[in-house]
Image (cartoon, rainbow, N blue to C red):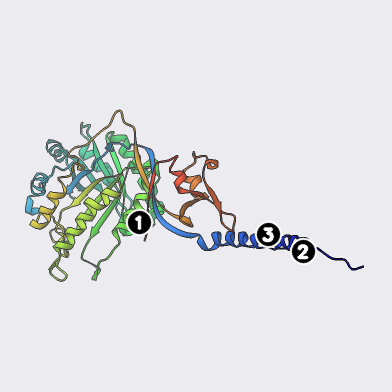
Amino acid sequence: MKKTISIGIIFLMLIVTMMGFGGCSQKHIYEDETVSVNEISKRDVDMELYVREEIELGKYEPFSGIYLGAYVEKNKDINKDILAFEEIIGHTQTFKVFQYTLEEGLSSQEILKCMAQRKVPYIKLLLGKDFDLVPLYRMISDIKASYNVPIFIELFPVSGRLTNPIEYKETYQRAYEVVKKYLEQSVVVWSIDDSRLYDMPLYYPGDEFVDWAGINIYVPQYKNGMRYTNDHVEAVDFWYKSFQKTKPMIISSLAISHYSRVDHTYTLQDAQNKLGLFYKDILSVYPRIKGVLYIDVDMEQVSKSGKEDYRITSQKQLVEYMKKIFKSEAFLEGIEELEDEKKIPVFMKYSIVAAQFNSELYLPQKYMSILFKKIPLSKLGMTQDLNGDKFYRLEDIGKYAEIYYEQQQ
């Protein structure tokens, strides 16, 4: 007998068979999409991440605002007078800057005059070749007397001639303890030339021996017979991020040449642009820089071989430009000592590499353990790459911390 299969049964079998093939097809599509997300859609994103944190104020660190100061001791054209500098430049200076040497010294009368002019003494003390502390003891003897006033001492700035970091740190640490013993109201500034910034880990004496951190920046037109070029923003950025959590900071020397005797050319517009970079652009981005000291000197008045003229006061264009800048309320006129406010909120700046999955930004897990220890990770959107590394959604992090960011081009 011949068996027959109804059309309905055949149709049902076809449907079951097609569903089986459909299931396999869907599985392949899902797996392909997973690979696509992790390998193709993920890309690295360089960014500056700003995180609001509470920090301890340093000694005489203002809650907000910037101290100004100037070195005019070699400027014969204004009679080495800080008040004349102020009148020309259009703003009161908090600091009068001195450089202490055994040859010239610094008398108590000069400190008294500085006080009478309502300025805070800022003394740069260079380290001798033999690491001798005699200049330090002589300086303390010269100025101690019976005065109990704020005084800033830039102790042994790290310059190009230093080559022994171990002996330097030991000498600096002893000197710090001597200063603190005899000058109770002193603030000790550790500083480094911008040309030595990447040697900083070798020469830094430790947080317990530093009150403020400084950077010394000279911008000549020529150096060693060659046109001088330097990425000042990159240098300041590296220095700032090294201290933003622990120390108030000061640009402890700033000198920008507008005339060089190497080729006898004036570059006033370039000098003006650089003044704007340091007194406007940089100060607006790095909020814990609390001071700028200008070195208003023609190097020919310091040495016969001096080639660069760094004076602002000698050029009307630069004077008028700085007068406009100093109209900002950000620039303070006197020293501040806060009694009640011990902490301030500051947006800390971090250079990081984020990850973008599709259109969303994520932070690698390593940043979470450093920057956001108190945020519950279980509350954040998380994804993983093929290596198993975890990433947390930046938008979710913003629900638990005050942050903002700038993507780098």
Q: Residue at x 27, y 31 (%)?
A: 338
Q: In terms of image quadrants, where is residue 297?
A: bottom left
- Of circles 2 and 3, the one toward us is 2
Question: Residue 144, percent across and down?
Answer: 22, 36
Residue 147 in sight: yes
Q: Which residue is mark 1?
A: 197
Q: Relative to residue 374, is residue 403 drawn left or right?
A: left
Q: Which residue is mark 3?
A: 23
Chain-order first, disc 3 or disc 1: 3
- Of circles 3 and 1, the one toward us is 3
Q: Residue furthest right?
A: 1
Question: Residue 360, percent across and down?
Answer: 46, 53
Q: Residues within 10 Å of mark 1 (few under 14, many from 20)?
A: some
Chain-order first, disc 1 or disc 2: 2
Question: Residue 25, percent across and down?
Answer: 65, 63
Q: Are marks 2 and 3 in contact (CB under 8 Å)?
A: no
Q: Secondary structure at mark 1?
A: helix
Q: Residues within 10 Å of mark 3 (few under 14, many from 20)?
A: few
Q: In this orientation, which residue lies closer to the viewer: 407 or 227?
A: 407
Amino acid residing under circle 2: Ile
Q: In this orientation, which residue lies closer to the viewer: 275 or 220?
A: 275
- Give the CA distance from mark 1 to mark 2: 87 Å
